[in-house]
Amino acid sequence: MKKRSLLNGSKINPHSAAVTATFILLVAGCSAVSLFTPDKLLSETENRTLEQRPKLSAETLLSGEFTEKYELYMSDQFFLRDKWVALRNYSEIAMLKRELNGVYLADDGYLITRPEINVGIMEKNTDYILRFAEKCAADLGPEHVRVLIAPTAAEVLREKLPPFSEVYDQSSLLDSIAAALPDRVFCNVLPRLDEHSSEYIYYRTDHHWTTLGAYYAYTEYCDSIGIKPSNTEDFRQIVASDSFLGTLASKVNIAVRPDELRIFENMNASAEATAEYDMNPSTAGSSIYAMQALSTRDKYSFFLNGNRPIVDITAAADNGRTLMVIKDSYANCFVPFLTEHFERIIVIDLRYFNADTAAFAASEGVTDMLILYNAEGLSSDSSIVKLGRSL
Amino acid sequence: MVFSSLPFLFRFLPAFLILYFISPTKLKNAVLFLASLIFYAWGEPIYVLLMLFSTIVDYVNGILVDLFLNKNNKPAAKAAVGLSVLINLSLLGFFKYSDFIVSNVNSLLDLSIPLPNVALPIGISFYTFHTMSYTIDIYRRQASVQRNIISFGAYVAMFPQLIAGPIVQYKQVSQELQSRSHTLDGFAAGVRRFMIGLGKKVLLANSIGALWNEISVLDASALPVGTAWLGAVAFALQIYFDFSGYSDMAIGLGSILGFRFPENFNHPYQSLSITEFWRRWHISLGSWFREYVYIPLGGNRMGIAKQLRNICIVWLLTGLWHGASWNFIAWGAYFGIILIAEKLFLLKLLDRLPKFVRSLYTLLLVLVSWAIFAFDDFSVGLSYVGAMFGAGDGVGNNYTLYILTSYGLLILIASIFGTDLPSRLAKRMASSEKHDGSAKVLPTAAECVAIAAVFLLSTAALVNASYNPFLYFRF
C-alpha cells in the first residue's frame, strides 16, 4: 500500500529496509489491534468503569470535548492496558525508583501509600470532628463518645519505607487531636499497633489494616470505654481469601505477593449479627459479610458489603446500648468485633449519607458514638464537612 | 494533537502515511495541507481558522510583493512586506501578549482595566514567524513567490513543524515544496530520527520532569542547596529532551515526507561558552532572529555601539518570544549581557582556561538561567536562584538524599544522552561494516531492536501516563 520510489533504480539498502519494516510493523500492528479490540466496560484491576467511545457531533468537535475524550478513551481501552502499565512500572524499577504512582515499594513485599498531606483540608476536617464530638459528648456524656483516628502503614511500618523517604508524623497529629478533645474522648490506638508492628497488621497490597490490625485497635477501644474485649483465643481465624490483591496492587500493577483476608469468627458469640442495608427492609436479616465479594477483585468489600450510606446491624448483646459509627472504610473490618458488646450498631458513611447525623442519632436512641477515620483520609475526605449539618 | 500521544501514533500517523504515499505526486501537498489542518484542529477546533487567516493574508501579500518588485516599485513592495509583518505581529501581540500589556499598563498608570484573558492558540509563535519569513524572503528575492495556495498552505500548516518548530524559513524548503523525492533511505532516516525524538520526549523528558514537578512547588526559603541544584538539573534535562525530542520527531517526519528541515539542537550542554551554547540551542530561532532582525538592523557592520544595541534588541525580543511575562524578558536580558561580555573580553579570557573550567562556567550560567525561565513569577524564580546559592535551608536533608537515590540513575543516563557520546558510538558501530555486507547484520539488528525497545517502552509510558505535558505549549 505504501509506495516508495527507488533512487534511480539502484538496489534497496537492506539497512533502510529493515528499519522501515520494523517501524511499519510496530505502528501498523498496534494501530490495528487497538482499533479492532472490542471496548471493555470495566477494569477489574482498576476497579472503575472505563471511558467509552465519545459521541461525535459538531458540538463536541468544536468544543474540543470529542478530542479530549477520544484520547482518554484510547488510553483506557488500549489492548493489554494492564500489561503496558506493568511494563512501564518495571522499567521504572530498573531505574531504581522505589515509588510508583504514589505508592512506595517498601521492604518485605509491602506496598505503602505515600501520604499526600493537604494541611488546609486536614485542619478543616479535624475541626469538624472536634466540634461534632463535643456536641455528642454534651448530648450523650463523654464516656459514650470516642474519636478513633487510625494510623496508616506509612506511620506504623516506618522502618520498611525506602531509605531517606520522609512521611508525615501521624503520631503528633493524633496527640494534637487528643489534646483538643475532652479527657479520654480520643482513643489512641497507635501505641498498641506499634507494639504489634512486626505482626501482619496491615495488608501488603492494600491501604487498609488487616482484620488483626483492626482487632488490636478494637482492644484499645474496649479498654477506653471500659468493656472487656474478647481475647484472640476466643476467635477462630478463617482465611476467607488467600489471593487478595488490594488497591495498592492495582496502582502498581507489578507482580506482588497476594494478601490473606481473614474473618475473626467469635466462637463464644451469643447470636449471629444481621444487617439491614441502606434502610431497605428487603435486605433485613442479611449477613454483615458479603461472600460474593470474595470472587471479585474488590475483596475488601466482603466486610459490611463495602461502603454503604447506612448499615443497621442487629447485634448480639442484650444491654440496650445502640452504637453509631461515623466512618470511612477502615471501620468495615473493625465493626464486626463490636457486635458482642452492643445491641444495635448503626454504621454511617458520610459520603452517601446526607441527613443531620446528630438528630438522626437522637431519633434512633443512640447511646454511644464512635467516629472512626484513618489519618491519611483526613487530608482528602470531602464528606466530613457534612457533620456541619449537626452543628 | 501531540506527536507523543496514542491518537497520533496509532490513528493519525498510519492513516496519514497511507493516504500520502498512495496519492499521486501532484496531490501530495494537498494531502499534507488537509491532514495538517486536521492535526491542528484536533487541538484547536476554532483557532484553526486563525491560522488559515494568517495563511491567506501572507499568500496575498507574497503575490503583491512579487507584483510590485516586477514593476520595480520597491516602496510598494516594502509596504506589502510591512503589512504582512504588521498583521502577523498584531495577531501575535493580541493573542499572546494582550494580558501582559494590559497588566503592565495598569501598574504603570494605576488603572484597573480588566484583563482580556484571550486564549493562546497553539503554535501561533511558530506559524506567524513562518509566514513573515515568506514575505521577507520574496522581497529579498531569496525565494520565488508561491502562487499555489495549497502548496503555500502546506508550508504554513505542515504538521511536523507547526506546533513546536524547528522554525523553517520559507527559502529553506521552497524547492522541496515544488518537488521532493521520497526514498527508502529518507524514510528510514526519518524513522530513526523520529524514534530518537520519541524516546527523548517520553522516556527521558517526562520522567525527569516528574522530579522537577515535585521540587518546583516547594517553598524556596526551606530548600537546601542540594535539592535546589538537583531541581535545576532536572529542569535543564527536561526542557532539553522535551524540546529537542520534539524537534527530532519533526525532522524525522519531515525526512519521511521528503523535506530536509534545519537542525535545531546540537548537544548544547557540551558548550564551552554561552556564545557557543546559543549556536547549539534552539538554532532555528537564533537563525530567524539573526536573519530577520539582527542583520537588517545592521548586525556588526555598523560599529561596536550599534552592534551592542542590536544584540540587546535581539535578546530582549528572544526572551519575550518565549513568554508573556517579565521573567522571560529578564532571561533574555541575562543572556544578552553575558553574550556582550563574552564578545567584548570574556571569550579571550576563557580561551586560555582548560576545557573543564569552560564547561563548568557554561553549565553554571545555564542552570541559573533555567531557574529564571522556569517560574512565571520573577520573584519566585529569584528566590529559587537564591536557594541554589544557600539562601534556603542548609545544604541537604533526607529529601535531598531520597530524590538522589530515586532519580540519580535517570539523571546519569539522561546526562550521557545529552552528550554526543551515544551518537558517536552508534556511528562507529554503523561504519564498522565491510563491503561484502556480512558485518552489516549486527548493527542493523541492533538498531531494529533499539527502535522496537524505544517504541514499546514509550507506548507503555503513554498508556500509563496522565502526565504528558509539552513544555513549549505556550507557543
Image (cartoon, helix red, strand yellow):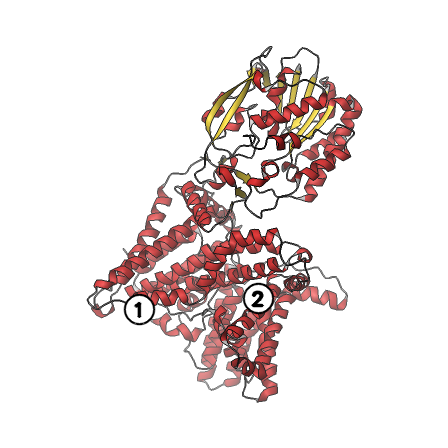
Q: Nearer the viewer, mark 2 or mark 1?
A: 2
Residue closest to the far left: B436
Q: Chain of mark 1?
A: B
Residue closest to the far right: A138
In the picture of the structure, the residue carrying the numbered disc 2 is: B367
- Whole-angstrom CA distance, mark 2 to mark 1, is 42 Å
Which of the 4 quarters of the picture holds residue A21? bottom left
Closer to the camera in the image, B195 or B166: B195
In the picture of the structure, the residue carrying the numbered disc 1 is: B181
Q: Secondary structure at mark 2?
A: helix
Please state the total of marks drawn on the protein image.
2
Q: Amino acid at mark 1?
A: Ser
Q: Residue at x 56, y 72 (%)?
A: B361
Which quarter of the rendering shows the C terminus of chain A?
top right
Q: Residue at x 33, y 48 (%)?
A: A29
Which quarter of the rendering shows the N terminus of chain A?
bottom left
Sequence-first tag of 2 and 1: 1
